[in-house]
Image (cartoon, grey):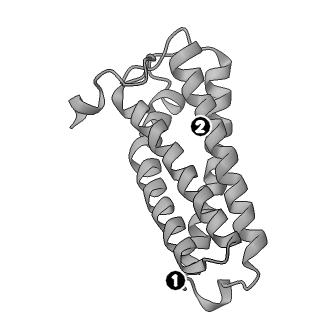
Amino acid sequence: MTDFLHQPGFLGTNANFAADMTLTLSLLVITLFSVGFFLAIKGKYDTHKWVQTSGAILNVILVLWLMILPYRDFIIRDSGGPREPIFYQVTMLHAGLGVFAFLLGNFVVLRGHKLVPKFMRFENYKPVMRTAYALYFLTTVLGVWVYYTWFVVTSKPPVF
């Protein structure tokens, strides 16, 4: 599996298959969240809940499997570095905002399925869900910037 993920990517950049797959699946996640957002506006709440849940599950897999390890290796351990400051700055901004989006978004999903203690439940969903969606959207934009910085403009792209 490792050899498969580390083969050259399919988007024509310096990225490997894992990075290209991460970007593509991240765009799928934000698409699912956007579809779910519009389903809620149309009042199709049950379908909305399952579309959002699917996007959140896919996002959990992406973060835990394909995002944390490169962050550890290329930001914390600085494997192959040092690199331009923008490489670290954009990645840390993406990760910092992403932590909030990840935690809030997954809390909203768990709350929607009544899987949190009663004292943590809230009734006014709209502002919380819209905040989570906005954070995910901004995090995705920053993620595209990370990809661009790491694999298009950086003079020493990460190799893994």
Residue on which the image places disc 1: 115
Residue kind at label 2, given as amino acid type: Gly
Q: Does residue 18 appear left or right of residue 28 in this picture?
A: left
**Quadrant for the C terminus in the image:** top left
Q: Residues within 10 Å of mark 1 (few under 14, many from 20)?
A: few
- Residue 18 image offset from top left, x and y in percent: 36, 33
Q: Going 45% across and 20% down the picture, which residue do you hit? A: 158
Q: Which mark is residue 143?
A: 2
Residues packed near mark 2 inside 10 Å, few (<14), some (14 to 19) or many (20 plus): many
Q: Is residue 8 above or below residue 69?
A: above
x and y percentages locating residue 10 in the rendered image: 37, 25
> With respect to residue 50, does 113 lie above or below?
below
Q: Is residue 1 left or right of residue 153?
A: left
- The residue sitting at 43% across, 48% down in the picture is 62
Q: Quadrant of the N terminus?
A: top left
For this rendering, which residue is in front, 46 or 9? Answer: 46
- The one nearer the camera, 64 or 108, is 108
Q: Mark 1 is on which residue type? A: Leu
SS assignment at label 2: helix
Residue 40 point in image, percent of width and height:
66, 72
Q: Residue at x 59, y 37 (%)?
A: 143
Residue at the far front: name it.
42
Q: Which mark is residue 9?
A: none
Residue at point 67%, 89% (across, down): 119
Instruction: Decide which of tag 2 and tag 1 comes sooner along the chain.
Output: 1
How far, Cα to Cα, is label 2 from label 1? 29 Å
